[in-house]
Amino acid sequence: MAQSNDGPEAGGAPPGPANGPSPGRSPRRVVALVTGASSGIGEAAARRLAREKLDAMVLVARREGRLRELAASLPVPTTYVAVDLTDEGAPERIRAHVEEHHGSLTLLVNNAGASWRSTFADGGWENVRRTMAINFDAVVRLTEGLLPLLRDSAPSAIVNVASTASRVARAGAGAYSASKYALAGWSDSLHLEEHANGVHVGLVLPGFIATEGFPATELRERRLTRWIVSTPDTAAEAIVEAGLGRRPERYVPRGYGLIALTRMVSPALVRRIQRGGAVSVLTTATHPDLGEEARRP
């Protein structure tokens, strides 16, 4: 279902001309699209982007009620598409919506994702498959569908929300790390390919972020570890920097970049530390079915 904060209730007529391309306006319209926008980092990113000089915004997630409420609360003309990004026709539906109601796209924020904790021996290929389907395959498919619009609107940008898990993997999160490693590597390549077309590709790598899908309760309750848990608002600021600010890469918090650097310089040291008992305090529970994303490093 697609709808607008300026239009009637869901299920009624489509959004009015106020949300579509206006003949009297400048052809350079700034339109942002955020996936996984019904909660957590995606919702925070939408609210943060709404404070920028945008002409319009598109919200994408599964939960229509949440999207409707968020769209109505934003100070910019906002439409939404309630869809599961793993559905076969999702990219085509979203592109058709953007073309019909906005006519252009300046910023694509690929944020939606999920994680299911499991060792490979227990979860096997099925856990890898379902994790890759939402965290990597859906991102690639949506980007493919929207890339022509981004090229036409250049200078434009894509922000892919990966994770520190795309630099340092942990036991029990192999499928999640694999999906985010793939996303980070593909993002670097896509940047090189699209730079000449005026499409910037930025990467945001959150560490532990407390969201509905990933409450990080265990970490926040311990004095020793609560400092490593950040907020969706901090991640949203990084998304703005990587997108509108055209930064190549941002860790959230910034200090997590040191972990990735240590992994590159001394992988044997990092493996020894990870095998030690101290790392067990970083074990957390995720609830991917509660939110649009279950973010963890």
Image: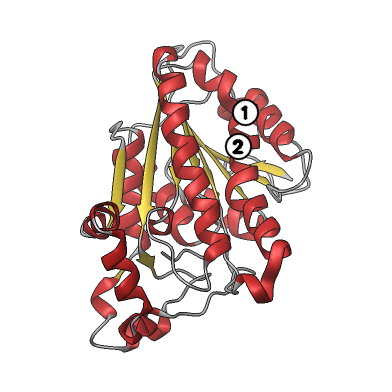
218 above or below 14? below
| Badge 1 amino acid | Glu
Is residue 41 rendered to the left or right of residue 274?
A: right
Residue 108 place in picture, x, y as percent? 49, 35
Residue drawn where x is 39% and y is 84% of the image: 280
Q: Secondary structure at mark 1?
A: helix
Q: Is residue 37 visible?
A: no
Report the residue marked by disc 2: 140
Q: 10 Å neighbourhood of mark 2: few (<14), some, or many (≥20)?
A: some
Is residue 59 rendered to the left or right of residue 216?
A: right
19 above or below 103? below
159 above or below 152? below
Residue drawn where x is 59% and y is 24% of the image: 20
Residue 161 place in picture, x, y as percent? 44, 48
Q: 10 Å neighbourhood of mark 1: few (<14), some, or many (≥20)?
A: few
Q: Is residue 261 visible?
A: yes
| Badge 2 amino acid | Val
30 above or below 184? above
Q: Dividing the picture into quarters, in which one does residue 62 lie?
A: bottom right
Work out whether residue 153 or residue 130 is closer to the camera in this orientation and state it.
Answer: 130
Tell me how the rendering is colored: secondary structure
Report the residue marked by disc 1: 144
Work out whether residue 275 or residue 193 is closer to the camera in this orientation and state it.
Answer: 275
Mark 2 touches mark 1? (CB < 8 Å): yes
Q: Secondary structure at mark 2?
A: helix
Residue drawn where x is 68% and y is 71% of the image: 123
Is residue 261 rendered to the left or right of residue 186?
A: left
Q: Quadrant of the N terminus?
A: top right
